[in-house]
Amino acid sequence: MGKLTTTLTALTLALSVSTAFASECDPGEVVAKLSHVTGGTTHPKVVAANLLADRVNKEMNGKLCIEVFPSSTLFGDSKELEALLLGDVQILAPSLSKFGSYTRQYGVFDLPFIFKDMDAAIRFTNSSSGKELLNAMNNVGFVGLGYWMSGMKYFSANKALHVPADAEGLKFRVQSSDVAKAMIAAMGGSPQPMAFKEVYGALQTGVVDGQENTWSNIYTKKFFEVQDSTTETSHQLLAYLFMTSSEFLDGLEPAVREQFLKISNEVTQTANENVKAKEQNNRANILKAGGKINSLTPEQRATWVETMKPVWKKFESDIGADLIKSAAEA
Ligand code: SIN
């Protein structure tokens, strides 16, 4: 009887696992799990990840198959990098702000107002310095396949923010980035690092007063519902490192690897071409859903730039003056 119960429990567990993660992959195919933390249908990372899976699963049928796990359903952002090194997941696209324990150089992407807009960021990532940065963590076993742009970031809070002084004394959720922490401190706020999936609850319950993100994250995660308004600061970039592990990549047959890399490059290009329109749609979606957006006058914008300028100096030796210069010149 005990044995029968155990068998039934194991069977139930197997069935529930296969229902939760129904796989389109055929037996015998190499399977790559792609885990990410964003959600909805209109988010640039969701669209890029699904496009990658669609193309690989169609064009490489029988050789390689990608299963996508969105919205932190497989790993949240505190565990996913470790999971990649352990081989529990094979493809990720974390925000470039989340690599502080592996490389200081990626701090360049977080410097406030370093990129005028996403086009400048794309120019930098296509430059030789940007391309070199894809290999910054090869020694750890991480391989950068490309940069997926997401958007510029804006501050939201439980009160309207027009100038940095409005943020004095407020608690802001940040990603695990020392640059972001220094930026909030420069505004007189208190930075609270937190996993992405906890942000909505923290804003709703008042654990934090505000956060910074793209239109796509503010819309798809409904942050606008639990904030007074969002201010068009465009103070920072949010972009992702589309990545895998050297263990996974080196383990593929050479021809399979080549085809996977080719599709990966093409998907990266397509994703970055469409990203601005997706961001603008999600900005419009926020307004349609009743969210409030504050624009800045040129004078107000200048106060944000001025307040955050000292952050660059603070991280110059960590990031490297040359790298900062080439990003700023882009
Ligand atoms: C993401 O877009 O992947 C998450 C960004 C965040 O943690 O704010």
Image (cartoon, rainbow, N blue to C red):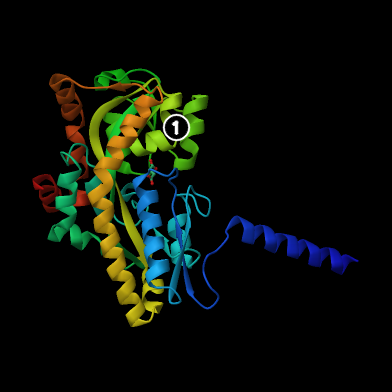
Q: Residue type at mark 1?
A: Lys
Residue 136 visible? The answer is no
Look at the picture and state if 255 lies above or below 139: below
Look at the picture and state if 92 lies above or below 203: below
Left or right, residue 131 beside residue 48: left
Where does the image place residue 3, in percent across and percent down from the top left?
A: 85, 69
The quarter of the picture showing ligand 1:
top left
Where does the image place residue 84, in percent across and percent down from the top left?
A: 44, 63
Where does the image place residue 276, in percent across and percent down from the top left?
A: 24, 42
Q: Nearer the viewer, residue 202 or 260?
A: 260
Q: Nearer the viewer, residue 314 or 181?
A: 181
Mark 1 element type: loop
Label 1 beta carbon less than 8 Å to ligand 1: no
Extreme front residue here? 58
Please identify the quadrant where the N terminus is shown: bottom right
Q: Nearer the viewer, residue 194 or 12?
A: 12
Extreme right residue here? 1
Left or right, residue 226 beside residue 3: left
Q: Nearer the viewer, residue 46 or 246?
A: 46
Quarter residue 220 falls in:
top left
Tag count: 1
Residue 194 visible? The answer is yes
What residue sits 45% from the left and 69% below the top?
Answer: 65
What residue sits 15% from the left and 45% below the top?
Answer: 120
Where does the image place residue 246, in percent across and percent down from the top left?
A: 36, 71
Left or right, residue 237 beside residue 142: left
Residue pointed to by mark 1: 222
